[in-house]
Image (tube, rainbow, N blue to C red):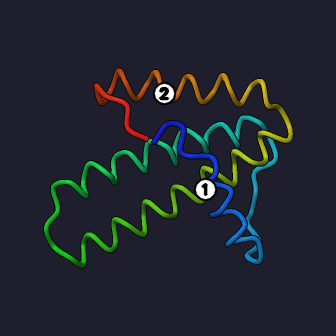
């Protein structure tokens, strides 16, 4: 996932605006949300590729959606607080994913 499609992320946030989200306040907390949700999404995607059971696939899709929502909520807040640091973090996430998973998939 590293850096997901920003337009899709904005769409997710707009759809969920009526739901109040608990947003971390510190940049360190926001950074952890970005890392955890990005890697959580990637691991869920890998599990999805090897799962044939329809019920399990639905659960994985829900997990992936939760990770996307968390990522873009944190990204939006971080973008408002420190856009330069956000770019550095997203580059770092991408680099880590390429080293760990061997390929980049958004």
- Which quadrant: the C terminus? top left
Seen as rendered, the residue at the extreme front is 7
> Which mark is on residue 22?
none
In the image, 17: left or right of 3?
right
- The spot of residue 51 in percent (x, y) is 17, 62
- The spot of residue 71 in percent (x, y) is 60, 50
In the image, 38: left or right of 98?
right
- Which quadrant: the N terminus? top left
**Which residue corresponds to the image point at 13% horizontal and 67% vertical from the top-left?**
52
In space, the residues marked 2 and 1 are separated at their CA atoms by 17 Å
In the picture of the structure, the residue carrying the numbered disc 1 is 70
Task: Please name whichever residue, 102 or 24, is drawn nearer the observer in this view of the structure.
Answer: 102
**Which residue corresponds to the image point at 63% horizontal and 27% vertical from the top-left?**
89
Crowd band around label 1 with a 10 angstrom C-alpha radius: few (<14), some (14–19), many (20+): many
Task: Please name whichever residue, 31 or 62, is drawn nearer the observer in this view of the structure.
Answer: 62
Relative to 82, residue 19 above or below: below
- The spot of residue 48 in percent (x, y) is 25, 58
Of marks 2 and 1, which one's residue comes earlier in the chain? 1
**Which residue corresponds to the image point at 65% horizontal and 62% vertical from the top-left?**
11
Relative to 56, residue 70 above or below: above
Q: What element does badge 2 sit on?
A: helix
Q: How many marks?
A: 2
Crowd band around label 2 with a 10 angstrom C-alpha radius: few (<14), some (14–19), many (20+): some
**Which residue corresponds to the image point at 61% horizontal and 40% vertical from the top-left?**
32
In the picture of the structure, the residue carrying the numbered disc 2 is 94
Q: What element does badge 1 sit on?
A: helix
In the image, 5: left or right of 18?
left
Image quadrant in which you'd find residue 102: top left
């Amino acid at each position: 996932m590293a850096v997901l499609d920003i337009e899709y992320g904005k769409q997710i946030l707009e759809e969920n605006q009526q739901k109040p989200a608990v947003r971390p306040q510190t940049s360190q907390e926001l950074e952890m949300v970005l890392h955890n949700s990005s890697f959580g999404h990637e691991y869920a995607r890998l599990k999805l590729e090897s799962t044939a059971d329809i019920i399990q696939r639905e659960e994985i899709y829900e997990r992936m959606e939760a990770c996307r929502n968390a990522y873009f909520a944190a990204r939006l807040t971080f973008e408002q607080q420190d856009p330069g640091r956000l770019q550095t973090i997203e580059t770092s996430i991408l680099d880590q994913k390429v080293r760990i998973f061997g390929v980049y998939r958004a």
